Structures are given as structure tokens and as C-alpha cells.
Amino acid sequence: MLDLFAGARLTPTQRRIAHCLVERAGTAAALSSAEVAELAGVSQPSVTRFAIALGYPGYPALRRALRDVGGGPADDGGEDNAMQVAIKAEAEHLQRLKEQLGSLDAVQKAANLLVASRPLPVLGLRAAAPLAGYFGYFASKVHPDVRVWDTGGTSLLDRLDQARVAGAGAMLALVLPRYPRESLEVVKEARAMGYAVVAITDSAVSPVAEDAAVVLPAAVGTRLVFDLHTGPMAMAMVLLQAMCDADPEPVQRRLEEFEAAAARRQLFQG
């Protein structure tokens, strides 16, 4: 049954419906759209839109496809349950990322651009905000001026102007599905201003790719109601490692200074 949903970009509501059907694989084909809606806790029109998102003209056609697939419950007969399937998919994403990193040309190019930028803006809105903060926290230990932009609004373009005047030449943009329009607009404006934009996103054909100098794709997990960002997180840390490798002496000095300050201030228990 999972094959019916593979490759479809579903909203969180639609994923709830998919999850509901997978959990009831043995009886899903017998359920009406109203019954699916009640079980998933969504509206009946949402079930119809879900079927259309999968490429079917409506729920009856999807129901026929479910009947053709058949099969028992996802956790029957020793098969993986839905949660295990989601984690297995993440492991497959990481394996593909490992193979992709067989060539480090793009990562090294991105690292050279970012490590030379003073200041270094890091953009990550909505779903990408936690990743921007995570990257920025560690990057600030090896880069003298990291500016994390994880909230939108009219002042965002002002900050873009200010960073450029201060000398910024590159920007890291973390743009993940569902691709916030504001993120794409900021990246487009940054490119027009002369920034070299490095984008970490889910695909080489992501909407942000056309305005980025370097694209570092890393797939996101779509098996649960909300995306899993294991791949982009790994890519961000690989990029930070490459930045450290690109300028090792200042990086080592800053790390030693941080450790000395942390010990003096007793910042950590262990």
C-alpha cells in the first residue's frame, strides 16, 4: 500500500489520511470517504483532495486501487509497522546522501564561499528555522559573525541590506518543503544584490535552486504526518565540517578560545 503514496508531496492533513489507511491496510478498501474522514479526524472533502493529490479523479478510484493492492495490516506477520517504515526510509535517505558525498566538489565550493563571508547570514524560515538555529549555534564557534534569520517579516530585507553593507558576500539558505514564499523571495533578492547563495534543500530541482550558486540536496522524510529532516541536518553538519577544513588555523584558535571561556564561566556540567 505504501507504494500508492510514494513520491507524492502531501500536506500534513493528507499524511494523516495516508497514515490512517496504512494502519488499517486490511480493511481500508472497505471504508467510505466519510469513514476515513472520521477515523483520520479530517473533513470528508479533505479525503477527496487527498485522492486527487495522488493522481486519482476522486476517492472511489483510490478505493479501487486500495482493493487491488489488498494485503493485511502493516504490523501483521512480522512486517514493519508504519513508524519502522518511516525510520527505514530515513536510513535509505542517509545511504543515498553517503553516495552523493563521494564527490565533495559542491560541498567544498559552498564551504569556501561561506567561510569567507563576513558576516555570514543563515536563513531558515518556518520548518527550517530549527535547523538554521542548530547550524548557527555551532557555526558561531568557528566563524566570527554568524547572523541567523529564522523569523520573517518586512525587516528581513533590511537585515539583508545591512549584512551586505557590512561586507557579507555569501548566504546560507535552508529552504525545506513546503518552500516558504518569503524564503524564496529573500534568496532571489540576495542574488540580485550580489550574494552567492548556498542552498540546503530537499532536491536539486527545488524552487530555490534557480537562484542559488551552490545547491546541496538532502531528501526529507515524508512517511509521517510531518517531515523528518535527518538528511538536511546531516548535510548542514557536513557543510560546517567542510568550512572548518577550509580555514583550519583560525577555526582551531576560535575553538580553543571558546573552550577556555567556557571553562572560566563554568558553562557546562561535564
Image: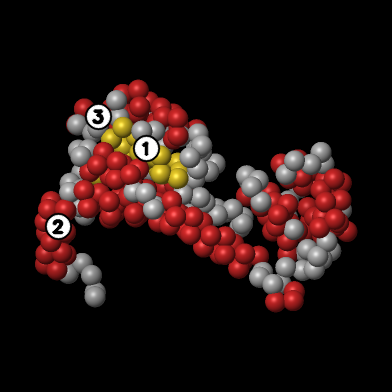
- The answer to the question of whether label 3 and label 1 lie on touching residues, with beta carbons closer than 8 A, is no
* Residue located at (82% from left, 55% from top): 66
As drawn, the residue found furthest toward the top would be 192
- Labels 3, 1: front one: 1
Amino acid found under the numbered disc labelled 2? Gln
Residue 10 locus on image (x, y percent): 64, 46
Q: Residues within 10 Å of mark 3 (few under 14, many from 20)?
A: many
Q: Is residue 75 above or below residue 62?
A: below
Amino acid found under the numbered disc labelled 3? Arg
Distance (Cα) linking label 1 and label 2: 26 Å
* Quadrant of res 86: bottom right
Residue 238 locus on image (x, y percent): 34, 54
* Residue located at (31% from left, 24% from top): 193
Of callouts 3 and 2, the N-terminal one = 3
Distance (Cα) linking label 3 and label 2: 27 Å
Residue 149, label in figure: none
Residue 214, label in figure: 1
Residue 183 locus on image (x, y percent): 44, 35
* Residue located at (35% from left, 43% from top): 106
Question: For numbered disc 1, what is the local secondary structure?
Answer: strand
From the viewer's perspective, tell me whether residue 97 is left or right of residue 249.
right
- According to the picture, the residue beneath numbered tag 2 turns out to be 252
